[in-house]
Amino acid sequence: KRWCEKHKPDDVLLGVFIGGCTGGVAQSFLMSPVELIKVNQQVIGRSFSSATSIVTSGLFSRQIAWRGLGATLLRDGLPHGVWFASYQYSKDYLSQIDGTYPGKSSAFIPLFSGAFAAFTAWAVGYPFDVIKTRIQAAKEFNESKSVAQATREILSESNGRPFAALYRGFWLKIAKAVPASAVNFYVYESVVESLRVIGD
């Protein structure tokens, strides 16, 4: 973002989007095994120690610790770019309406922008979360499905309602993600502003 602000001010949103995508892809390699442990506890009913032991013992096996990584990359890569770019877009737009300038926004702006960003990001990424969970929820660790196979399986069970199948549980996710994102960005902006004041 800062590089774009200095060298290509018209491409700030693109810079934010690329930065968000890069961060999302990077975190996928950490979150995929963690998500696999969580799904094994919640869906299959394994204990934490059992699920953790299986995943850690298979760190070098694509079928074990990294099962669902492809879907996790799709869930966290592009949607994270959308998340940060949506926040920046909403913040800039509301700041112009509010008559303020960056760094001096009212509390409403980061709260609303954070909420808006979470909604748009999960609207893009939620189907991949459903697909990831289906892949990781297989009871046998040697049962490996691709993203395409899991998607076909979900759609075959949709009774002609693919949207409902891929967005099952979406509003519960939004109920959690929207307020969390709003608070996170508000706290971030508050801390940045406080440090700016101290620096001045």
Image (spheres, rainbow, N blue to C red):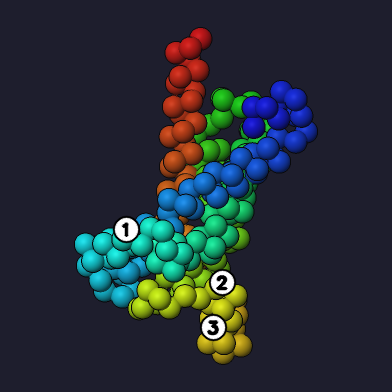
Q: Say left or right for 97 vs 25.
A: right
Residue 181: percent from left, percent from top: 47, 47
Marks 1 and 3: which is nearer the front? 1
**Marks 1,3: beta carbons within 8 A:** no
Q: Secondary structure at mark 1?
A: helix
Label located before the other in sequence (1 or 2): 1
Q: Amino acid at mark 3?
A: Glu
Q: Amino acid at mark 2?
A: Val
Q: Is 156 drawn above or below residue 88 in the view shown?
A: below
Q: Is 200 drawn above or below residue 78 in the view shown?
A: above
Q: Say left or right for 21 vs 193.
A: right
Residue 162: percent from left, percent from top: 60, 80
Q: Amino acid at mark 1?
A: Thr
Q: Is residue 178 in view from this perspective?
A: no
Can you identify the residue that label 1 sits on?
56
Label located before the other in sequence (3 or 2): 2
Can you identify the residue that label 3 sits on?
153
Residue 9: percent from left, percent from top: 75, 29
Can you identify the residue that label 2 sits on?
147
Viewer-closest of 165 and 28: 28
Q: Count residues near mark 2 (Cα–Cα under 10 Å), then give few for <14, some for 14-19, many for 20+.
A: many
Mark 1 to mark 3: distance in Å? 28 Å
Q: Secondary structure at mark 3?
A: helix
Which label is found at residue 65?
none
Mark 3 to mark 2: distance in Å? 10 Å
